[in-house]
Image: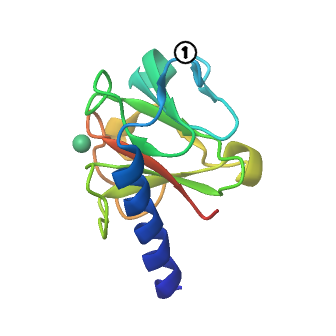
Amino acid sequence: MKKKTHSVVGSVLAAVLALGVSGVVMPAASAGTGACTSGYGCIWKDTSYNGLSFGTYNGGGVADKLNDQGSSAAANGKTCKYTRYYDGHSIAGSTSYFMLYSKQLLKSNYRDPKLSNGAGTGPGKSQNWDNRVSSIFHSGC
Ligand SMILES: [Ca+2]
């Protein structure tokens, strides 16, 4: 189990170095409904999935317009069970993240309308995540 975690972090780091910011502002996510396109990790500027949204398919940094500004999130990994929302851009070995499940693969705990009062699961689940998320990566692929 521990070994697998390391390889995931390694591949995630490689993705960060290779891709930098990789994602789209808008189309992957639908305002107000919490809908996040298949394969994406999504975040919205306001609570309850409102306002400007950002989604990433391959994982990477959150676009500048939403970096450290997200207040709600949803995940819909296509081949990955989990999506991690990190505080920083340098995520190698970082445990500063919360995790949402894939809507289509696990069918529960796949979104959170208010990140300020804790979010999803994982090491950061009890923290205030309002205006903190800087990168989004899938895991459990
Ligand atoms: Ca941050």
Q: Position of residue 63 (x, y in %)?
A: 35, 29
Nearest the viewer among 99 and 134 is 134
Question: Looking at the image, which residue is at 49% across and 70% down?
Answer: 8
**Dot 1 corresponds to which residue?**
31
Q: Quadrant of residue 28 in the image?
A: top right
Give, as a three-letter code, the residue at label 1: Ala
Whether residue 120 is visible, yes or no, is no
Instruction: Identify the residue at the far front of this view.
Output: 18
Question: Looking at the image, which residue is at 51% across and 31% down?
Answer: 55
Q: Position of residue 11 (x, y in %)?
A: 47, 65
How many labels were placed on the picture? 1
Q: Is residue 76 above or below residue 44?
A: below
Q: How is the image coloured?
A: rainbow
Left or right of 21 on screen, residue 36: right
Nearest the viewer among 23 and 50 is 23
Left or right of 4 on screen, residue 93: left
Image quarter hosting the N terminus: bottom right
Q: Is residue 58 above or below residue 131?
A: below
- Would you call the spot at circle 1 few (<14 residues within 10 Å), some (14-19), or many (20 or more)? some
Q: Position of residue 114 (x, y in %)?
A: 41, 33
Q: Position of residue 57 (x, y in %)?
A: 57, 40
Left or right of 8 on screen, residue 29: right
User: Which secondary structure, mark 1?
Assistant: loop
Whether residue 98 is visible, yes or no, is yes
The answer to whether the residue bearing label 1 lies less than 8 angstroms from the nearest atom of ligand 1 is no
Ligand 1 shows up in the quarter that is top left
Left or right of 10 on screen, residue 56: right
Question: Looking at the image, which residue is at 32% across and 41% down?
Answer: 133
Q: Quadrant of residue 67 in the image?
A: top left
